[in-house]
C-alpha cells in the first residue's frame, strides 16, 4: 500500500517528520527516505494517525488504490 502524492506533499515538512520519527522510532533521515521512496512504513497505523491529524485528509485521500474508511475507536 502506498500514499498518494497529495499526502506525501502534506507530510514533507520538519514538524511532521519529527512527529513521524517519534511514532516510528527512527531518524529524520530515515523518515525523509520513507517519504522519497513512498515506503510502506508510512502506512503503519501510528504513522497514518499522525498523517490524518496534520493533513486533515481522509483515508481515501491518503492511501492509493481502493477506498478506505477509518473508524476511530
Image (spheres, rainbow, N blue to C red):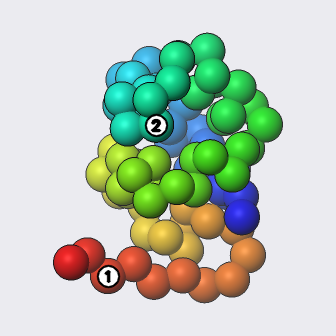
Number of the label disc, if any, that sits on residue 13: none
Q: Foreground: 25 or 54? A: 25
- The answer to whether residue 18 shows anywhere in this view is yes
Q: State the residue at coordinates (69%, 83%).
A: 66
At label 1, counting other C-alpha atoms closer than 10 Å, the crowd grade (few under 14, some 14-19, many 20 or more) is few
Residue 16 in the figure: left or right of residue 64: left
Reading the image, the residue beneath label 2 is: 24
Q: Mark 2: which secondary structure?
A: helix
Q: Are marks 1 and 2 in contact (CB under 8 Å)?
A: no
Q: Residue furthest right?
A: 37
Please identify the quadrant where the N terminus is shown. bottom right
Q: Is residue 46 above or below residue 30?
A: below
Q: Nearer the viewer, mark 1 or mark 2?
A: 2
Reading the image, the residue beneath label 1 is: 71
Measured in 3D between alpha carbons, the distance from the residue under mark 1 to the one under mark 2, in whole angstroms, is 21 Å
Q: Is residue 29 above or below residue 64?
A: above
Q: Residue furthest left?
A: 73
Please identify the quadrant where the C terminus is shown. bottom left
N-terminal-most mark, 1 or 2: 2
Q: State the residue at coordinates (30%, 51%).
A: 53
Residue 61 in the figure: left or right of residue 58: right
Q: Is residue 12 above or below residue 63?
A: above
Q: Is residue 47 above or below residue 66?
A: above
In percent of width and height, residue 50 lies at 36, 47
Q: State the residue at coordinates (63%, 22%).
A: 30
In percent of width and height, residue 8 lies at 61, 43
In percent of width and height, residue 11 lies at 50, 37
Amino acid at each position: 500500500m502506498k500514499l498518494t502524492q497529495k499526502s506525501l506533499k502534506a507530510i514533507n515538512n520538519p514538524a511532521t517528520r519529527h512527529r513521524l520519527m517519534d511514532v516510528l522510532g527512527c531518524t529524520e533521515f530515515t523518515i525523509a527516505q520513507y517519504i522519497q521512496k513512498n515506503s510502506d512504513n508510512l502506512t503503519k497505523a501510528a504513522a497514518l494517525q499522525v498523517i490524518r491529524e496534520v493533513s486533515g485528509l481522509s483515508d481515501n485521500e491518503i492511501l492509493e488504490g481502493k477506498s478506505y474508511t477509518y473508524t476511530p475507536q
